[in-house]
Image: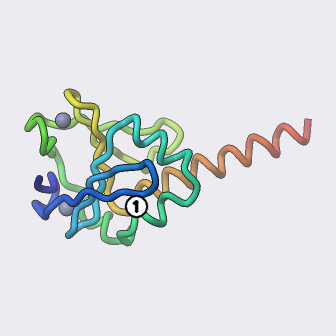
């Protein structure tokens, strides 16, 4: 399978019960949506799976209109309302999500720090 962004080879990577396809060139990740939730719940999964430098991801971040390498349909751009600097590409057919290098780490840490913020807020009340 080829990377939808840079046409590098996608390699299957495992970490515990997690499975992602990772590009050997730009380190972008192709992940099933359900897997993404599990990755977020899995402690330190980003250090094993999201190994590309964020600067590398940024280089490929301005690519428009990428196609799902599995279904060969245009992927939708989605943005997390709470984290508008993170754009993900999502396939309307198979629900796989493409993340640039560093984006998962970003996503995970933001979610994590948001949770801490909520906890602290709760304490003050
Ligand atoms: Zn790539
Ligand atoms: Zn697809």
Residue found at x 53% / y 39%: 82
Question: For numbered disc 1, what is the local secondary structure?
Answer: helix
Front residue of 2/90: it is: 2
How does the figure colour the protein chain or chains? rainbow
Quadrant for ligand 1 reads: bottom left
Would you say 107 lies left or right of 12 here? right
Q: Nearer the viewer, residue 4 or 121?
A: 4
14 vs 108, left or right, is left
Residue beneath the point at 50% across and 45% down: 83
Q: Quadrant of the C terminus?
A: top right
What residue did someone put label 1 on? 49
Q: Residue at image x 40%, y 41%?
A: 35
Query: Hey, which residue is sitting farthest top in the picture?
Result: 93
Horizontal side of 12 relative to 53 (left or right) equals left
Determine whether 107 is above or below 102 in the image: above
- Kindly identify the residue that appears in the image at 73 percent across and 46 percent down: 117
- Please state the total of marks drawn on the protein image: 1
**Residue 115 image point, x, y percent:** 68, 44
In the rendered image, residue 20, in percent from the top left (x then y), is placed at 32, 51
- Residue 95, horizontal then vertical, whole percent: 28, 32
Q: Quadrant of residue 23?
A: bottom left
Q: Residue furthest front?
A: 16
Position of 79 relative to 62 (above/below): above
Q: Is residue 101 left or right of residue 104?
A: left
For the question of whether residue 67 can be seen, the reply is no
Mark 1: few, some, or many residues within 10 Å (few <14, many ≥20)? many
Q: Position of residue 33 (x, y in %)?
A: 36, 36
Residue 9 seen in this snapshot: yes
């Amino acid at each position: 399978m080829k990377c939808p962004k840079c046409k590098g080879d996608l390699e299957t990577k495992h970490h515990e019960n997690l499975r992602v396809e990772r590009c050997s060139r730009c380190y972008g990740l192709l992940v099933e949506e359900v897997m993404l939730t599990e990755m977020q719940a899995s402690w330190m999964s980003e250090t094993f799976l999201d190994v590309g430098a964020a600067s590398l991801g940024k280089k490929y971040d301005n690519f428009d209109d990428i196609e799902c390498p599995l279904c060969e349909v245009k992927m939708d751009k989605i943005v997390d309302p709470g984290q508008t600097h993170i754009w993900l590409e999502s396939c309307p057919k198979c629900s796989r999500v493409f993340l640039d290098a560093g984006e998962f780490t970003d996503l995970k840490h933001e979610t994590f720090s948001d949770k801490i913020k909520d906890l602290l807020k709760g304490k003050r009340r």
